[in-house]
Image (cartoon, helix red, strand yellow):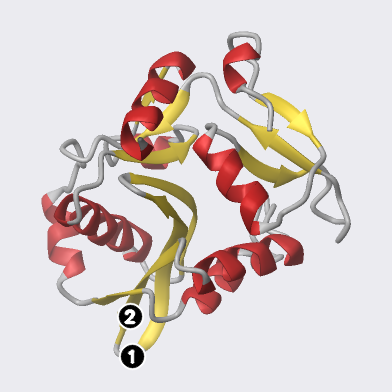
């Protein structure tokens, strides 16, 4: 697995190729990399491995929860690791803009869940799954992969629940890959790749 420290500053794409076996994925995340298919429309598309510079993270003491979100959260029920497959498949909905989660990605992360590395947060409204997120945890590090919602504030509720769980279980680093406007509104910040890699080493040492 290539060392992203050797990548040019500001260059997000580090490598292309390799497989999605559990050992490959775990080694990649430990090195600060994550996969996305080169061509999501093809089942056997090659994998591209990214280490964004700068990297999006949510400080575990810096989540922004508005009063309106606090009120909205009251109507939902939240669980952890009860519907991982359903959450991943919802995130992989082919009708979603910018879809990149292919069937091999679904299979690979489901295997990681079965091995104890993958985790999901599920949000329900009157018994119906209306939002959630999934990712990968290694020691005190959590890599957020994707989220979805079919009800207003459901994915934000999942994020709040995740941060509460991470804080309660001694996590140090919550990686969200890139900072989007949506994530920035919740407290996500961009950090230079060297600083991110140093924080990652600390979290999984």
Element marked by disc 2: strand
Q: Residues within 10 Å of mark 1 (few under 14, many from 20)?
A: few
Give the quadrant of the N terminus. top right
Q: What x and y, as percent, mark residue 193?
A: 48, 18
Q: Nearer the viewer, residue 49 or 90?
A: 49
- Give the residue at the far top of this rendering: 9
Residue name at image x 70 percent, y 25 percent: 14
Q: What x and y, as percent, mark residue 154?
A: 34, 66
Looking at the image, residue 159 sits to the left or right of residue 99; the answer is left
Mark 1 lies on residue: 127
Tag on residue 124? 2
Above or below residue 122? Residue 195 is: above
Give the quadrant of the C terminus. top left
Residue name at image x 38 percent, y 74 percent: 81
- Give the residue at the far bottom of this rendering: 127
Report if the CB atoms under discs 1 and 2 are less than 8 Å apart. Answer: yes
Looking at the image, residue 173 sits to the left or right of residue 61; the answer is right
Q: What x and y, as percent, mark residue 6?
A: 63, 12
Number of marks in the image? Answer: 2
Looking at the image, residue 139 sits to the left or right of residue 56; the answer is left
Element marked by disc 1: loop
């Amino acid at each position: 697995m290539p060392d992203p420290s050797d990548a040019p500053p500001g260059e997000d794409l580090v490598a292309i190729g390799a497989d999605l076996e559990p050992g490959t994925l775990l080694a990649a995340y430990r090195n600060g990399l994550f996969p996305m298919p080169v061509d999501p429309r093809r089942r056997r598309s090659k994998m591209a491995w990214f280490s964004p510079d700068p990297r999006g993270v949510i400080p575990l003491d810096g989540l922004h929860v508005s009063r309106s979100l606090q009120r909205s959260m009251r109507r939902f029920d939240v669980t952890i690791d009860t519907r991982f497959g359903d959450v991943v498949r919802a995130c992989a909905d082919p009708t979603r803009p910018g879809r990149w989660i292919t069937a091999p990605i679904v299979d690979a992360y489901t295997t990681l869940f079965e091995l104890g590395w993958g985790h999901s947060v599920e949000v329900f409204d009157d018994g119906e799954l209306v939002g959630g997120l999934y990712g990968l945890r290694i020691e005190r590090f959590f890599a957020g992969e994707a989220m979805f919602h079919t009800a207003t504030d459901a994915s934000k509720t999942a994020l709040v629940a995740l941060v509460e769980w991470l804080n309660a279980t001694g996590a140090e680093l919550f990686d969200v890959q890139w900072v989007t406007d949506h994530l920035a509104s919740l407290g996500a910040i961009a950090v230079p790749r060297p600083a991110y890699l140093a924080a990652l080493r600390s979290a999984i040492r």
